[in-house]
Amino acid sequence: MQTSQLHPTSSRLQQVDFANLGFGNYVSDHMLVATYKNKQWTNYEILPYSPLSMAPSALALHYGQTVFEGMKAFRHQQGGVSIFRIEKHYDRFCRSLQRLCMPAIPFEVFVTGLKELVSKDRAWVPAKDGDSLYIRPFMIATEERFGVKVSEEYKFIIFTGPVGSYYSRPLKVKVEDEYMRAAKGGTGYAKCGGNYGASFYPAQKAQEQGFDQILWTDGSPELNIEESGTMNAMFVIDGKVVTPATSDTILDGVTRDSLLTLAVDLGYPVETRRISAFELAQKHQANLLQEAFGTGTAAVTSPICCINIQGKDYFLPDYTENSFCVKARNLLHAIRTGNTPDKYSWNTIV
C-alpha cells in the first residue's frame, strides 16, 4: 500500500458541524484508489479526496457496471476506532461484483487499505453518541468504449464521511403493489447502482402520497414482503422476530444478520420465512403485530409507525426502550463502541 506524498493544503475538518451532521453531507480528507488493468490490480494509493477524471465513454456511465458497499466505524471506549464486520462486508461486496462481471478486489488490499484510510482520517470519526464514520467502498468500470461489453478496466475507491442518524422519526410506509424492486434471477441481492436508481420513481410517487418509504413485495397476488425501502424489513409478531429469508431478490444485510444474532441473545425466537402483507393485516387485527422496522447500515433500525396496505392504514404501537428494535439497536451500538464485550469478534480496532 502506498500513501501519496500529496496532502490537502488544509483539512476540511474545521468545516464540519459535528452537532448537526445529517447524512452524506461531509467527506473526509482522503480516499483509497486502486486501478485494474491488464487483468491485475495495481497502484494502491491513499490520496487526498478529489474529483475523478473519467472519459465520457467510460462503460460505467452507460451500462451500469457499478457496485458499492456501506460500512461504519465508531469511536471505541478503550481508545482507537472500531470498524464493524469487515469480513462480512467484503464477502457481500465480492458477491455483488461477481453478479456484475467485475473483478474481486484482493482481501488483503481491501482490509489493509481500509484500516490505513480510517486510521489516517481518524479525526473525522464523530465522538457524539449515535454518530459514526460512514465508509463507502465502490467499484466502477472505466474502460473507454461505448460498445456493449464487459469492461476490462476498473477503479476501486473507498472514501469516508461522518454521519448522524438516517431517519429521525418513525416512518409511515406503503406496501407497493404495482412496482417491484427486484425479480427472481435478477440483481436484487447485489448492491449495484441500478437497483437504487430503479427504485427512485416508485418511492417518489409514494412520498407524493404522504408516505416516507415503501415496503417492497415480490409482485405476487399474496404481496409477500421483501424489503423496506433501501433496507431489510423486520417485524415482531407475538413476541417473535420475523423477517423474510434472503434470496436472489433480497439483500443479505449485515445489520440484519447482526440483529438476528442479537435477537437470540435477547431471548427472542427468530423466524426467517415468507410473510405477506395480508398476514401483517391479520396479525394487526389480532393485536399480534407489535413492531415493524427497517434495518441497514445507514439507519441501523428505523421503526415503522404505520403500514398502508391497499389503501388502509394499520397503525402500530408506540416504540419504547422495551421494544425489540430499540433494545437490539442499543446492544449493537454498545458492542461497536466497546461498552459491551464483542463476543462475536465483529470489531476491527485501528
Image (spheres, rainbow, N blue to C red):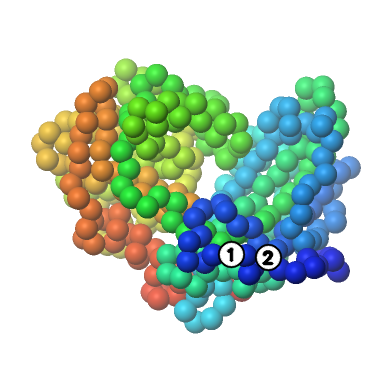
Q: Is residue 242 left or right of residue 87?
A: left
Whether residue 192 is visible, yes or no, is yes
Location of residue 210 in the rendering, given as x and y in whole percent from the top left corner: 34, 32
Q: Which mark is residue 12?
A: 2
Location of residue 257 in the rendering, given as x and y in whole percent from the top left corner: 42, 52
Image quadrant in which the C terminus is located: bottom right
Q: Depth check: 97 or 5 in front? A: 5
Which structural element holds mark 2? loop
Q: Is residue 232 left or right of residue 144?
A: left
Where 334 sits versus 26, above or below?
A: below
Q: Which residue is mark 1?
A: 16
Between marks 1 and 2, how big is the CA–CA gap?
Answer: 7 Å
Which structural element holds mark 1? loop
Location of residue 77 in the rendering, given as x and y in whole percent from the top left corner: 47, 79
Asked if the residues shown at circle 1 and circle 2 are in contact, with their CB atoms under 8 angstroms apart, the answer is yes
Q: Is residue 110 left or right of residue 291?
A: right
The residue shown at (59%, 48%) is 69
Q: Residue 64 occupies which quadrant of the picture?
A: top right
Characterize the local packing of mark 2: few (<14), some (14-19) or many (20 or more) Cα atoms within 10 angstroms. few
The residue shown at (61%, 42%) is 95
Characterize the local packing of mark 1: few (<14), some (14-19) or many (20 or more) Cα atoms within 10 angstroms. some
Q: Depth check: 295 or 237 in front? A: 295
As shown in the figure, which amino acid type bears the numbered disc 1?
Answer: Val
